[in-house]
Image (cartoon, helix red, strand yellow):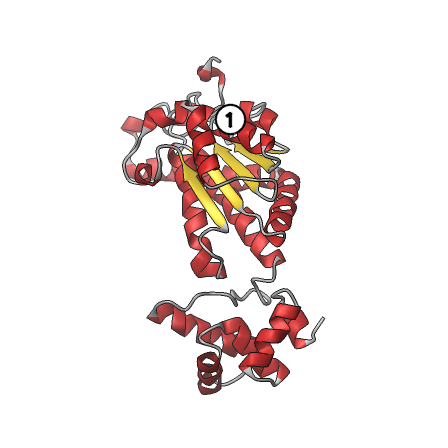
Amino acid sequence: MDLSTLGTETRNERTADLDRMPVTELLSVMNDEDRTVALAVREALPEIGAAVEAITESLRRGGRLIYIGAGTSGRIGLLDAVECPPTFGTSPEQVVGLLSGGPGAFVLAVEGAEDEPTRAVADLDEIGVDDRDTVVGLAASGRTPYVVGGLRHAAGKGAVTVSVACNRDADVSRYADIPIEIPTGPEVLTGSTRLKAGTAEKMVCNMLSTASMVRLGKAYGNLMVDVKASNEKLVDRARRIVVQATGADPDTAADALRAADGHAKTAIVMLLAHCTAEEATRRLEKAGGDTRTAIGRP
């Protein structure tokens, strides 16, 4: 394939004199280009929505959301995965990020690793990909061999496959049940897909994980009620979440949190359903983790 034909690889006429621009002009043109990304993502909302439904169903039946990618794309997937446990109280095994070249490639680039599709097969086999999972392949160019190999293998194992590319008619789209294409166009710095393409991929990952977790009851209103209060900042956030959700005073919220072992969702159910921590836990288990159902509100 002639890579020069890809939108992400072509030169941006607006930045042909990038090296001569004053800093203020350079930053202004970068900001103008970045503004186009959200609009490009918006065009793909139907496909992103279909992916959210697939991911939600996978997680409900005990499967996983698995991101695979190389370089910047893989790092973005891994970043989204590692943020899920503290934000949503998930186990580290529930949302997984596979990066070509292994975890060490997050801090030290292993560029050649993206050309080896068999690496993805080995990485997916190592975590036991199966028909309960949804595998999301991230490839800015849309033709990364590691991602293509991973999607083909995941499909063979019965997993739902999703691709995210930043060019039209992407190769990876042919191997996905749900192809997501976001044509971000020429980069400010030619071919540097860590810029607009990377931003688009980050936005999509934000949507996939956040919307899926909300659908699973990991939010009450817009509050992250399954947050893990693992440091001083998050302990304070959990207390404020309980106050905002229940209208209780800070001391009452803190007492409820202590009784609930620091779990904001349990504390909220305790206060709004006027029950013990044990009863709140039972209600949440019966409600599948949904706070509104547990407290008896529509």
Is the C terminus in the top left, top right, bottom left or bottom right quadrant? bottom right
- 287 on left or right of 143: right
Residue visible at 50% across and 32% down in the picture: 184
Name the side, left or right, on which 126 lies relative to 63: left
| Residue 88 can be seen in this image | yes
* Nearer to me, 125 or 294: 125
Residue 32's quadrant in the figure? top left
Query: Which residue is pictured at 40% across the width and 74% down the height?
Result: 236
Count the numbered circles shown.
1
Q: In this view, does 24 lie to the left or right of 179?
A: left
Q: Relative to 99, say whether 111 is above or below.
A: above
- Residue nearest the observer in this picture, 195 or 222: 222
Q: Which residue lies furthest to the top in this view?
A: 2
Identity of the residue furthest to the right in this view = 298
Q: Measured from the top left, where is residue 169 in percent x and y?
A: 59, 23
- The secondary element bearing badge 1 is classed as helix
Residue at the image position 42 percent from the left and 21 percent from the top: 11
Q: Identify the residue at image location x=37%, y=67%.
A: 230
Residue 15: x %, y % from top left: 38, 27
Where does residue 71 sit, x and y in percent of width and height? 38, 33
| Relative height, residue 237 to residue 152 (above, below) | below
Q: Where is residue 222 in the image (x, y as percent from the top left)?
A: 56, 64
Residue placed under numbered mark 1 in the picture:
148
Question: Which of the pair 11/59 is nearer the observer?
Answer: 59
- Is residue 35 visible from the viewing direction of this image? no
Looking at the picture, does residue 91 appear above or below residue 129?
A: below
Q: Which amino acid does label 1 sit on?
A: Val
Q: Check disc 1: other Cα within 10 Å, few if <14, some if 14-19, many if 20+.
A: many
